[in-house]
Image: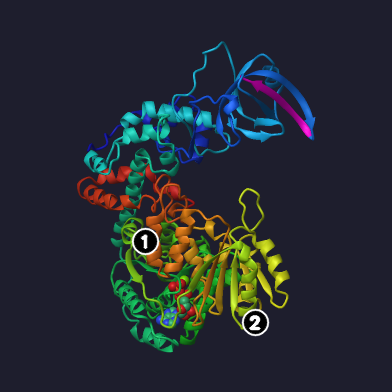
């Protein structure tokens, strides 16, 4: 391994050193976080197009994206509802129409009968044949002038005013000029042991894949070239988390030691006893809080295991010594629920619980700001609003973040920074209901110590899960009617909120209408992400209070919502959702002592993978088990991963798909941190950039 040479040549540092890049283009590139030519190397294609082969027109089928070529037989401007240019091309084997709705005079003049044209686009069915709408095309000169591409064509993520062709050209320049200057920090023998190529090969492969590459692997992101980059990206994130941890842990914090009496009074006031795991987690937390450096602890526990009460008990350690606690929830809905639980638990102990959300009116908000600033508010519950500029804490000693996979690590850091008291940094407690396997946790949460609550509160009955084809929906409606008449409540979840012919999915709105019709004796509520916060709140309250007995919802209810009377969970289009999402949704029921059921409605035929997912849910209620099985089941082609859940902002890697790389990541990280901290810095810089880039994580 080399250390970076001090003076890198200017071409490697300045975008305008690339051909065709001036200040305006540099600015557009900056929007893609491309500030230096080397950043282009790590801008990875979203997908690829195969322009290496010509498909004879007679063999072109609807749905194919391909290159075709033919002689123009006919070109005309037609009016069929709107004006369009139609160009018929033939090649002896068949014919195809090019259809343009927008075209310039020059284009029209160029596309004239007798010319030979090559096009790339999607073949579609058209009345009486096949067509391409707005294909990319070029008029061919004398035969043989233009060869086909010899590599697959990468399609990059782009931004307005920046064309693919331009981006491709720039990436090409970066590969030719800068790639030789880029240091490969991963020892060759470690990469080779995982069957992975060196960095140079990996980058060349992903930007310019040879035509004989395994397209399925490439599409699934499992090609060794992609995995090599994923390894490096995971390593960079892991290193950055370990840095964050070191830096935070090296700062002082206020030791919180004397809360035991208050905490015991609180626990005695509860109608239940903590489970063993809750107790252990609380012990871990209290031990950390007593330390002179900030606690950085994650409590991992399945939905319903009772993390909130542990958080409330932990908060008392700060309150008992006159300090404040901020509790941050990812959604208003969940925030309100915490506000209600904390208020019900803590107000009787004489503790002031405040609520701060973005939707408070100005006046109310200012009153809360004042209470936070003068220390009257002791426990402050809220959403992102908690770390806005205008909020000034009197004495923040503990930050609790719920469902942290919805927050970036840098949002947490900002909240901690906000609470800085002189030199002291607040303690932080993070709670997540996304159980992830241990090796992954060590990579993804490298900045945190972990406590696990695996035990469920006693008396819970496991949720029984059944899967039914949607043709049997009527039976379920009857079932819901009977259950709700007997005092129970039901969630009916639809993945989308509007009919869409692109994704054939049930919509919450039409389901709401349907159920309102079918269940005249019941009151059916509706909640979805596009409703105003106030309306969502009302819908949720009505359901919690039993004013509505059925709640039709999109996946907005996924996070943390707690209604003990809800015993039925019906999930439409269950075949479309991933295992962990289905498990999270199922966790909304089975929270009281009544037997609960989860019905997975699906559209036949089920894919083999969907069958197995549903099978797992029927077999187990244990979130950790579900997570492990999820890992096993995710094969190539499965797109849902941690990238989507936002555990980390990753470009190439998918923590679930690439989970087998986690031990290697940890192994390399140990060596690098010991032997070459500069390499660690360089890798973080390469993949994550400098902290200035974290503006809007
Ligand atoms: P989650 O871990 O999903 O956030 P909650 O904190 O919302 O779970 O707890 C779910 C429900 O279980 C709440 O109504 C809570 O009061 C209750 N609960 C928590 N701990 C216990 C316990 N030890 N015994 C009985 N009920 C409990
Ligand atoms: Mg919770």
Res. 684 in view: no
- Disc 2 and disc 1 in contact, CB within 8 angstroms: no
Does the stretch in magenta take in 90? yes
Q: Position of residue 599 (x, y in %)?
A: 55, 68
**In the rendering, which numbered label is found on residue 628?**
1
Q: Which element is circle 2 on?
A: helix
**Segment tinted magenta in the rendering:** 82-91
Total labels drawn: 2
- Name the quarter where the N terminus is drawn: top left
Q: Which residue was labeled with disc 2?
A: 485
In the rendered image, the vertical position of residue 284 relative to residue 628, given as above or below: below
Q: Give whichever of discs 2 and 1 has the lower sequence position.
A: 2
Q: Is residue 451 left or right of residue 369?
A: left
| Front residue of this view, candidates 155 and 224 | 224
Picture residue at 47% right of the left edge, 54% below the top:
608
| Gap between marks 2 and 1 measured at Cα | 38 Å
Judging depth in this view, the residue of 591 and 384 nearest the camera is 591
């Amino acid at each position: 391994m080399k250390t970076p040479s001090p003076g890198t040549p200017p071409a490697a540092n300045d975008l305008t050193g690339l051909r065709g890049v001036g200040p305006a283009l540099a600015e557009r590139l900056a929007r893609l976080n491309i500030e230096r030519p080397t950043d282009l190397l790590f801008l990875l294609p979203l997908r690829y197009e195969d322009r290496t082969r010509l498909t004879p027109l007679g063999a072109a089928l609807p749905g194919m994206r391909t290159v075709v070529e033919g002689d123009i037989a006919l070109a005309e401007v037609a009016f069929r509802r709107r004006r369009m240019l139609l160009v018929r091309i033939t090649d002896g084997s068949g014919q195809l129409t090019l259809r343009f709705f927008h075209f310039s005079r020059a284009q029209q003049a160029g596309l004239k009968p007798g010319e030979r044209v090559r096009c790339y686009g999607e073949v579609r069915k058209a009345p009486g044949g096949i067509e391409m709408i707005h294909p990319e095309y070029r008029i061919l000169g004398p035969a043989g002038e233009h060869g086909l591409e010899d590599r697959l064509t990468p399609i990059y993520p782009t931004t307005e005013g920046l064309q693919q062709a331009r981006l491709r050209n720039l990436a090409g320049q970066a590969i030719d000029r800068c790639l030789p200057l880029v240091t490969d920090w991963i020892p060759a023998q470690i990469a080779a042991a995982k069957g992975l190529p060196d960095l140079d090969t990996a980058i060349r492969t992903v930007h310019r894949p040879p035509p004989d590459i395994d397209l399925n692997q490439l599409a699934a992101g499992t090609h060794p070239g992609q995995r090599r980059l994923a390894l490096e990206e995971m390593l960079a994130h892991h290193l950055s988390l370990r840095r964050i941890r070191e830096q935070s842990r090296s700062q002082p914090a206020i030791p919180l030691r004397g809360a035991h009496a208050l905490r015991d009074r609180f626990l005695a006031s509860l109608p239940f006893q903590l489970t063993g795991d809750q107790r252990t987690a609380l012990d871990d937390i209290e031990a950390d809080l007593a330390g002179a450096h900030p606690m950085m602890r994650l409590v991992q526990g399945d939905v319903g295991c009772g993390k909130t009460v542990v958080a409330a008990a932990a908060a008392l350690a700060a309150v008992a010594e006159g300090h404040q606690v901020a509790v941050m929830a990812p959604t208003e809905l969940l925030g309100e629920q915490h506000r209600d639980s904390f208020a019900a638990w803590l107000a009787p102990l004489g503790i002031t619980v405040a609520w701060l959300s973005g939707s408070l009116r100005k006046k109310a908000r200012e009153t809360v700001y004042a209470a936070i600033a003068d220390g009257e508010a002791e426990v402050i519950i809220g959403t992102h609003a908690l770390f806005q500029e205008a909020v000034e804490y009197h004495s923040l000693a503990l930050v609790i973040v719920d469902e942290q996979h919805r927050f970036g690590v840098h949002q947490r850091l900002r909240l901690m920074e906000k609470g800085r008291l002189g030199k002291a940094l607040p303690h932080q407690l993070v709670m997540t209901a996304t159980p992830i396997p241990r090796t992954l946790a060590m990579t993804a949460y490298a900045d945190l110590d972990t406590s696990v609550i695996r035990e469920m509160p006693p008396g819970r009955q496991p949720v029984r899960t059944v899967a039914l084809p949607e043709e049997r929906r009527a039976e379920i409606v009857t079932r819901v009617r009977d259950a709700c008449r007997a005092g129970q409540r039901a969630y009916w979840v639809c993945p989308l909120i509007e009919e869409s012919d692109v994704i054939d999915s049930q919509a919450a709105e039409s389901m709401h209408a349907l159920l309102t019709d079918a269940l005249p004796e019941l009151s059916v509520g509706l909640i979805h992400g596009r409703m105003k916060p106030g309306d969502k709140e009302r819908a949720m309250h009505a359901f919690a209070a039993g004013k509505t007995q059925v709640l039709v919802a999109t996946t907005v209810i996924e996070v943390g919502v707690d209604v003990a009377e809800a015993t039925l969970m019906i999930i439409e289009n269950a075949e479309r959702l991933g295992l962990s999402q289905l498990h999270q949704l199922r966790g909304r029921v089975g929270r009281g002592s009544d037997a609960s059921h989860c019905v997975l409605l699906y559209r036949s035929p089920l894919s083999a993978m969907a069958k197995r997912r549903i099978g797992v849910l029927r077999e187990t209620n244990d979130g950790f088990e579900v997570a492990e099985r999820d890992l096993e089941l995710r094969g190539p082609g499965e797109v849902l991963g941690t990238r989507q859940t936002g555990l980390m902002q990753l470009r190439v890697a998918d923590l679930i798909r690439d989970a087998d790389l986690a031990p290697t990541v940890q192994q390399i990280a140990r060596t690098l941190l010991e032997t070459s901290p500069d390499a660690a810095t360089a890798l973080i810089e390469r993949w994550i950039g400098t902290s200035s880039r974290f503006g809007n994580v």
